[in-house]
Image (tube, rainbow, N blue to C red):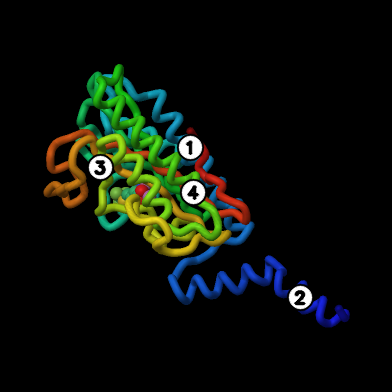
């Protein structure tokens, strides 16, 4: 092979050139903004803060804690770290964190509600640090959980784990949804349809949408540099829901328990990296 040909061939497999090309394609085709190395470092910093906040909150959760107290802890830690809370005033959301208790699926608003022994509470935080967003949530037990609480929390945690494990270039968003739905329904639980994972990093909610249900091989192909959340909301009963008159709080129609775990995930050259690492 002559030198010119070799040079052309090498250029064709130059990953940084391919990245730029795919970055433009994804912006045009899907409005997805792929993240560069420097962006990822910054989202990771916001992600570490998100995990720190969740860990601090966990230490304060016991029977008697109010969801307003959780909000206060989140606010203080966020301020101490010179960050901001994305939820505060987001489309009119009045607090800095979502606290979703028992049959509340998501977007619970902190208030004077007192947590009691046996409750479960999801705490969902999104700090903005140096302009970058990371989104993560965990469901905690209050005191000692009953059987149902145990079940729904472990199924939801496993759904997130299995969803993350299929993240790699060439797989599609539908593969994530499929893995999650299969596990949830296999355990006799159901997957919420109305709320989905989402691109994140430059903004709170970016394209693409990442449903937690779906079919293998469907949806948008994953490419390195994509950053999105996976945040399955899993119900012990049926998946249908309604939103309360505060226009935020989503609750299960059948009153069954609902649990959720969320991480911000990066697609790497080989597979994935979580930017909000916890297990
Ligand atoms: N953190 C939620 C998510 O995972 C969104 C909350 S919107 C808010 O996407 F306004 F309720 F904070
Ligand atoms: Co999210
Ligand atoms: Co969230």
**Disc 3 designates what residue?**
190
Residue 266, relative to residue 207: is it above or below? above
Image spot of residue 160 (x, y percent):
41, 41
**Disc 2 designates what residue?**
9
Left or right placement of residue 110 versus residue 254 in this view: right
> Residue visible at 45% across and 75% down?
29
Residue 82 in view in this figure: no
Contact, CB < 8 Å: mark 4 with mark 2? no
As helix, strand or loop, the secondary structure at mark 2 comes to helix
Which numbered mark, 1 or 2, is in the foreground of this view?
A: 2
Image spot of residue 239 (x, y percent):
21, 45
Q: Mark 1 vs mark 2: which is more N-terminal?
A: 2
Q: CA distance from mark 2 to mark 3?
A: 49 Å
Residue 18, relative to residue 234: is it above or below? below
Residue 43, relative to residue 63: is it above or below? below
**Disc 1 designates what residue?**
51
Q: Mark 3 vs mark 4: which is more N-terminal?
A: 4
Q: Mark 4 vs mark 2: which is more N-terminal?
A: 2
Contact, CB < 8 Å: mark 1 with mark 3? no
Residue 150 in view in this figure: yes
Marker disc for residue 14: none
């Amino acid at each position: 092979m002559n030198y010119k040909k070799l040079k052309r061939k090498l250029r064709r497999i130059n990953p940084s050139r391919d990245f730029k090309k795919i970055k433009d394609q994804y912006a045009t085709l899907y409005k997805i903004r792929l993240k560069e190395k420097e962006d990822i470092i910054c989202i990771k910093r916001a992600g570490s803060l998100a995990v720190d906040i969740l860990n601090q909150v966990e230490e304060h959760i016991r029977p008697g804690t109010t969801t307003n107290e959780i909000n206060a802890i989140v606010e203080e830690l966020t301020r101490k770290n010179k960050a901001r809370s994305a939820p505060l005033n987001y489309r009119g959301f009045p607090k800095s964190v979502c606290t979703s208790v028992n049959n509340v699926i998501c977007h619970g608003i902190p208030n004077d509600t007192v947590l009691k022994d046996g409750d479960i509470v999801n705490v969902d935080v999104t700090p903005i640090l140096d302009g970058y967003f990371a989104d993560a949530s965990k469901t905690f037990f209050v005191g000692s959980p009953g059987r149902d609480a145990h079940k729904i929390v472990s199924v939801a945690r496993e759904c997130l784990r299995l969803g993350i494990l299929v993240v790699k270039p060439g797989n599609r968003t539908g593969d994530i949804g499929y893995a999650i739905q299969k596990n949830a329904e296999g355990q006799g639980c159901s997957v919420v349809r109305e709320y989905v994972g989402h691109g994140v990093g430059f903004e709170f909610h970016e394209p693409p949408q990442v449903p937690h249900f779906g079919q293998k091989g469907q949806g948008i192909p994953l490419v390195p540099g994509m950053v999105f959340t996976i945040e399955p909301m899993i119900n012990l009963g049926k998946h249908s829901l309604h939103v309360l008159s505060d226009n935020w709080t989503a609750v299960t129609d059948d009153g069954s328990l609902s649990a959720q775990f969320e991480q911000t995930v990066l697609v790497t050259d080989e597979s994935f990296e979580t930017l909000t690492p916890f297990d």
